[in-house]
Amino acid sequence: MELKKIDKILNKEPEEAAEELIKEVEKAYGEVPYILNFMRQSPELLVTKVLYDNAIFREFKRMDAKTIELISIGVSAALRCDHCLKMHIRVAQRLGITKEEIFDAILIAGTLSNAAVLAEGTRAIDSQKRNDAEKEKCEVCGIPEEKN
């Protein structure tokens, strides 16, 4: 959305600005995301969220819409947000993104999610080993005792 259009929207009452922004989002995505429909009851928050999101997406001049949607699909899959995932798949299909490309984005998200689980788990194991090594051992049985 252009800055001139944003300035014009900001000069309106929150309810009117929210409805205008909803129309812009629907024009861009082909539908209105669930969270924005929900936020209609809080127009000040909706306007702020849409303008914030728009500011970020305006900076994506180096990425095309297809890349942005594939990232959105991967993140939605990794976060296990069923509603977001289905919406971004619909948007991707409207952009002509193939089922195979969508699946690739999901596979990448799954691989990274798996790596995150493994990294978190193994760090916890190593952390526990370090904690155990720092504990004083009982001279009789050799079991580490908690330091006070």
Image (tube, rainbow, N blue to C red):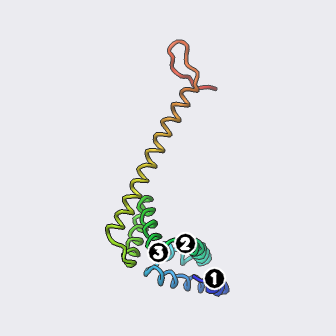
CA gap between label 3 and label 1 equals 20 Å
Residue 125, position in %: x, y? 48, 36
> Farthest residue in the left direction?
100
Q: Earlier in the sequence, mark 3 or mark 1?
A: 1
Question: Which secondary structure lies at badge 1?
Answer: helix
Where's residue 126, x and y in %?
50, 35
Q: Along the horizontal axis of the image, is 53 left or right of 84?
A: right
- The mark found on residue 60 in the picture is 2
Question: Going 41% across and 72% down the picture, which residue do you hit?
Answer: 87
Q: Which residue has dot 1 on it?
A: 3
Q: Amino acid at mark 2?
A: Phe
**Up-down: is 105 above or below 95?**
above
Instruction: Identify residue for label 3.
Output: 65
**Image marks 1 and 2: residues in contact by CB distance under 8 Å:** no
Q: Residue at x 55, y 84 (%)?
A: 19
**Circle 2 — which element?**
helix
